[in-house]
Amino acid sequence: MTSEDLDVDRYLSRIGLVGPVKPSLEALRSVHTFHLLSVPFENLTVHSGGRVSLDIRHLYEKIINRRRGGFCFENNGLFSWLLVKLGFQVTLLSGQVKNYITGRYGPPFDHLILMVNLEGRRWLCDVGFGAAGFSVPLSLETSGLQEQGHRVYRIRKDMNMHFLEWQQEENKGADGDWREIYKFTLEPRCLEDFTEMCQYHQSSPSSIFFCKSLSTILKPGGRLRYIGHKLITTTFPKGTEVATTTTRELKEDEIPGVLAEEFGIVLDSPLIPKDETITPPPVMY
C-alpha cells in the first residue's frame, strides 16, 4: 500500500460517516464519537503472533481495510492523520496512564493523545483508551467540570503537568471522589517518539497490554469489554439509575465468535487468551 491508497472517504465510511467533513467543533465531536463507536480499542495482535507497527500505511490497512482496532498508538496515530486530512490543526502529546491495578503511572510516552486547536481554543482528543475514556473532546481551556452523560471529567493543572480525572460511573459534583486517569504535558511530539514505548507495551510484564488480551468498544448506552476469558457488559445509567455490569465466562472456542460478533474482529492467526497479573514497574513516575 502506498500513501496514495489512503482514502479519507473510506476512513469516514469505516466509522459510519459520509464526507465531506469541514473543520468545526461539531465535526470534531462527531468524528470522535463515531470513531469510538466503530473502532475497538484492542491489543489482540500482540496475542495472536503479530507485532504492532506505527507506519501509517500499516495502520490504515489494519484499521480501515481489515476493520480491526488497536491500542493508543495505533488508534490515535491514525486518527491524527484523518484529522489533519480533514483540515484540523493537530498536535501529538505524550501521556502517562495511572494503572488502576498497580496504582502507578507509566513511563513517559506511555500513552499517545491529541490536542486540536480550533478557532483559538484547544481540545483534548483520545480515541485510544479503555473504559474510562471520554466520548467527545474535552476543553483544555478550563479546569472546571465537563459533563458527558452520567459521567463528569476535569483537567487539573499543576505547573506544566495536566491531570485528566473522572468520578468513574457517577457525578457528585466538584466535591466528588476524583480519580486520576492519566497525566500529560502540552509539549509537541511526533509519532516516531512513541516507537520505544510501543515495543515496551508488547513485551513488558509491567504493561497491561502484554499481560492481558483485551478489547473494548463504546456502545450506545454502554460499553463492552473482553479480557482473557471474560466478556464484561456495562450498561450506563438513565435518570436516577446506577450503572450495571455483568460478566460472562467464555470457553476458549467461544472467543473467536464473540470477537467477530461483538467487536467486528476477525484475526489472521489463533488468539492465545491471556489474563496475567501485572508486575508493578520498578521505577516510580
Image (spheres, grey):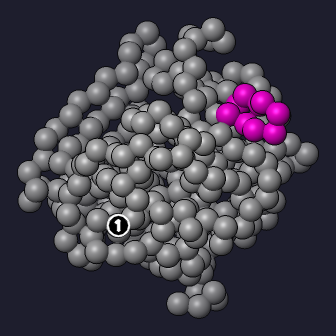
- The overriding secondary structure of the stretch rendered in magenta is strand
For the residue pair 241 and 267, the one nearer the viewer reads as 267
- In the rendered picture of this protein, how many numbered marks are placed on residues? 1
Residue 256, position as x, y percentages in the image: 18, 61
Look at label 1 and name its amino acid.
Val
Against 277, residue 54 (above or below) is below
User: Residue 160: within the magenta?
Assistant: yes
Against 172, residue 159 (above or below) is below
The magenta segment: 155-163
User: Residue 119: within the magenta?
Assistant: no
Residue position marked by numbered label 1 in the rendering: 46
Point out the residue furthest to the front here: 282
Say if residue 31 shows up in the picture. no
Say if residue 280 shows up in the picture. yes
Q: Residue at x 51, y 37 (%)?
A: 104
Residue 128, position as x, y percentages in the image: 53, 53
Quadrant containing the C terminus is top right
